[in-house]
Amino acid sequence: MDRQEYADVLRMLSQASVDRHFDAFVDVPWDDPDFAVDPDDPRWVLPPNSDPLGAHPWYQALPLDRQI
């Protein structure tokens, strides 16, 4: 990357840090099936490597339907 490309990237990142925008009603695809709330989805299970409760032997001994 030459100096000009670096300067362009730096300028773009600097500008993006100032002009942030987030509108949950516009930016989140609420009707997308991937965003549907499924009470049996295993993604609700707490991960043992990043959650203290998920790492506890008591929690890990629970059946999957109770962990969810």
Image (spheres, rainbow, N blue to C red):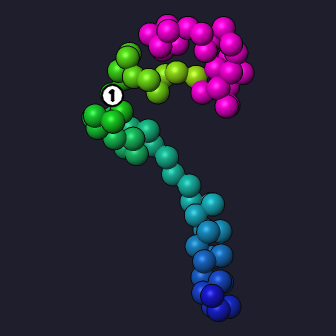
Relative height, residue 43 to residue 6 (above, below): above
Closer to the camera, 24 or 68? 68
Residue 67 on image: x %, y %: 52, 13
29 and 36: which is toward the camera: 36
Asked whether residue 21 is drawn in magenta, I would say no
Q: Position of residue 42 (x, y in %)?
A: 44, 23
Tell me where residue 59 appears, x and y as whole percent. 62, 11
Residue 30's spot in the image, x, y percent? 33, 35
Binning the other alpha carbons within 10 Å of mark 1 as few (below 14), some (14 to 19) or many (20 upward) gives few
Q: Give the residue type that dot 1 points to.
A: Ala
Identified at 55% across, 8% down, the residue is 62
Residue 48 position (above or below residue 61) = below
Q: Residue at x 66, y 84 (%)?
A: 7
Residue sitting at 35 percent across and 21 percent down? 38
> Is 63 situated above or below 18?
above
Q: Quadrant of the N terminus?
A: bottom right
Picture residue at 44% right of the left edge, 10% below the top: 65
Q: Is residue 50 above or below residue 23?
A: above
Q: Residue at label 1?
A: 36
Rendered image quadrant of residue 54: top right
What stretch of residues is rendered in magenta?
A: 47-68
> Image check: 12 left or right of 44?
right
Element marked by disc 1:
loop
Number of numbered markers: 1
Q: Quadrant of residue 31?
A: top left
The foreground one among 45 and 2 is 45
